[in-house]
Amino acid sequence: MAKTERKKMPTERTSHWDSVYSTKGENEVSWFEVSPELSMALLAEAGATPASAIIDIGGGASRLVDTLIAAGQAHVSVLDLSASALDLARTRMPATDRVEWIMSDVTTWHPTRVYDIWHDRAAFHFLTAQADQKKYTEVMTQALAEGGKAVIGTFAPDGPEKCSGLEIARHDAGSLQAIFGTGFKLLATRRHDHTTPWGTVQKFQFSTFAKLG
């Protein structure tokens, strides 16, 4: 049976995202993807194998975990601060001990294992305060194995300034490198146009980093 880890979260953040996921359908949020093709491609480029331990940060109700498990992934953790989001994904999937559901704010999370790959599609850009960005970096450093890869997707500098009613921090590879510091090396970056369920195009950037020893 899938393991679920629950932590206490900042009430304001949790309440916001629980409200989003409990009042909107899966395809009624701007970040919805029918198939996580880009993330799967980037994970492969980062060296993911079926034996890799992967964590999806802010995974929510994303279909990435379904796709990874269907492809034979040995271990996937999905971290999100919304119980409603995790419940949507968990109830959609067959029970499996290859998935760990972690309800926590990433900035206050304490990893209990190490991962080969850290994946974050559109969670980091909600951290607008430098203190939260620093905590995120510290947690990512703790969670990744030496040589592990981090695939980070955010709104690009010419992307939206808000999402889900919240201010966001737009990034490119350079601004992410400045935040993550010398403990990480930029390996690759690319732009991506995401089309929302209602046809709007959002400008994203995806950057892949390696954790240095």
Image (spheres, helix red, strand yellow):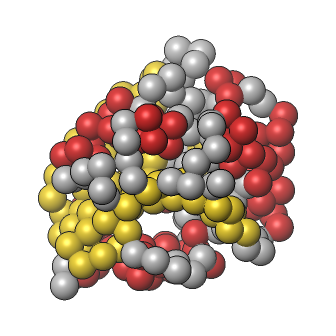
Residue 37 in sight in this render: yes
Relative to the observer, which residue lies in front, 171 or 198? 198
Percent across and percent down for residue 134 are 47, 79
Relative to the observer, which residue lies in front, 85 or 205? 85
The N terminus lies in quadrant: bottom right
Percent across and percent down for residue 110 are 57, 81
The C terminus lies in quadrant: bottom left
Q: Does residue 24 lie above or below 160 as drawn?
A: above
Residue 85 in sight in this render: no
Q: Does residue 201 lie above or below 83 as drawn?
A: above
* Residue 55 figure quarter: bottom left
Residue lying at 72% horizontally and 38% vertically, measured from the top left = 91
Residue lying at 62% horizontally and 36% vertically, measured from the top left = 93
Total tally of numbered discs in the picture: 0
Percent across and percent down for residue 133 are 49, 73
Percent across and percent down for residue 120 are 44, 54
Residue lying at 74% horizontally and 45% vertically, measured from the top left = 87
* Residue 70 figure quarter: top left
Q: Is residue 205 shown left or right of residue 169?
A: left
Residue lying at 73% horizontally and 54% vertically, measured from the top left = 82
Q: Residue furthest left?
A: 187
Q: Is residue 23 shown left or right of residue 43?
A: right
